[in-house]
Amino acid sequence: MPALPRPRLGACGLALVIIALVAPYCGAQKGSGLVAAEAYESFPVSRAYIDAGTAAAHEDLRVDGRILLTAVDEAGHSLPFANYRIYAGGRLARAGRAFADGSFLVYPRDPPEVPLDSPWRVEVACRGAAAVDSFDPRGQDAGKVELGHSLPLPSPIACDLVFALDTTISMAAALPALKRAIVAARDEIEKLRPELALRTGLVLFRDHGDEYLTKSYPLDADSRSFDSALAGAVGLGGGDIPEDVGAGLRAAVSGMGWSEDGVRIVFVVTDAVPALRPGELAAGGSRYADACREALAKGIRICAIGVGKPALGGEYALRQIALWTGGTYVAADYPGGPAYGPLDGDERTRPSGIVRSSLEDIVARIALAEALAASAVRPGGGEARDPALALLEGVQSTMASGLRYPEAARLRGISGTAVVDLRVSADGQLLESRVGSTSGSAILDRAALDLARSAFPTANPAASAVELEISLEYRLESDSGASQR
């Protein structure tokens, strides 16, 4: 979904910001105590964030010109875990495995030496079927490759989750809660989708000069071995601000024993700025950009979890890492946090919506959404994502289409921000609505409340009770477009 429009209504403009607070799946909290925020970001918003943060220390991952290819069958249904080989100028330029929704991301300008002045040939193979097509590497953002067969879906669906966990001293205070969240998320997935062939793996990472740089526990269906390894993790070492996040990612992407046909997700969890300079890296270097490229080739999504509001360079790198494989960035902290915002207050980089919940709920929903994309018959070109974000997108779309500046407020020159609190049932009915924070104007408050109510009933893909906090900014603008506050 593109960023929400900001319509000009005469001399008026509106801004819409939606924050969703998602209730736990099952009544009482199981107890990590960590609050998490997951943003709904269109690719243009994510790209704007990356472009705006070039002053932050980072590795180069060229996302401009991204092309999303999707393998589909003759009925137009996406084909999970298809294999892609892409040729430019007669030589192999890209090769890799599709995600659970059949999509494969291509970044034609990374690396930059591949020629872009002629069509690229794409070969796709999936469970005995194959197809050949071509596309312009300077062309559209999305395209489909049809294999011409109705292919059976894998059964059962394998779901492989690897947690790459920073275990340096700065993480010591948060580790007990993070361990509870990880175990609770795993248990939630098993309860809601017992038919999945779920396996979990663990990578602990620190920094060069510590007791270990990485310690890996390969994917295993036996939760007891995973729980034992996780329980033994303690926060020690580090000593400087950057940590070798790249080493942790490389270990998580390589050598874990990934399933041939299955969901593959890495959750990297850290509070640190990644080590970048030669003196910060272990011998041989551990570039996170290289791990990201390898993950993309293997069809591994990387979801980055920033703990306790990492420094600017840390949040930037984590959001860059998540963007590269179509993953998501999640900010996690104790109640009262986490802060999740744009770089330098740049409005172009502000997420169009945020889902807030316990960390375990968000992790579980991300994994379940990816598994659903592989196990259900889906229209080609869709994308797997947390169903709470799909709910958020639907509410955003409906409210954006109904945006109007109240005439009475416009004539009186009234502006302000109204916050509306809503409670939504599992089946998408509006159970409760009220003004949570007044704009200072009864006219604007009423308009905001009426607009929010008009979005319901609606489909609720999360299938659980959801609380929404919706902020609407009514702002008068001059003819030149400058704000009048």
Image (spheres, rainbow, N blue to C red):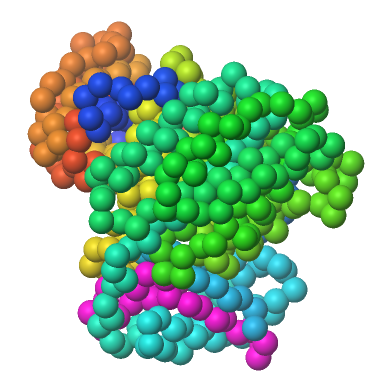
Instruction: Return the x and y of residue 264 as percentages of the image width and height.
Output: 47, 58
Residue range in magenta is 67-91
User: Residue 416 or 290: which is nearer the viewer?
Assistant: 290
User: Residue 207 or 394: which is nearer the viewer?
Assistant: 207
Instruction: Return the x and y of residue 146 as percentages of the image width and height.
Output: 35, 83
Establish if 381 lies above or below 187. below
Could you tell me which residue is drawn at 16 percent across and 44 percent down? 459
Instruction: Return the x and y of residue 106 as percentages of the image width and height.
Output: 55, 68
Residue 320 appears in the rendering:
no
Instruction: Return the x and y of residue 446 as percentages of the image width and height.
Output: 17, 18
Quick check: 52 left or right of 452?
A: right
Establish if 143 lies above or below 89. above
Could you tell me which residue is drawn at 38 percent across and 82 percent down? 127
Could you tell me which residue is drawn at 41 percent across and 69 percent down? 261
Residue 442 appears in the rendering:
yes
Could you tell me which residue is drawn at 30 percent across and 22 percent down? 29
User: Residue 232 or 289: which is nearer the viewer?
Assistant: 232
Residue 410 on the magenta span = no
Q: Quadrant of residue 255?
A: bottom right
Quick check: 251 left or right of 163?
A: right
User: In the picture, which quadrant includes the C terminus?
Assistant: top left
Q: Quadrant of residue 277?
A: top right
Residue 69 on the magenta span = yes
Quick check: 318 left or right of 147?
A: right
Extreme-top residue of the structure: 440
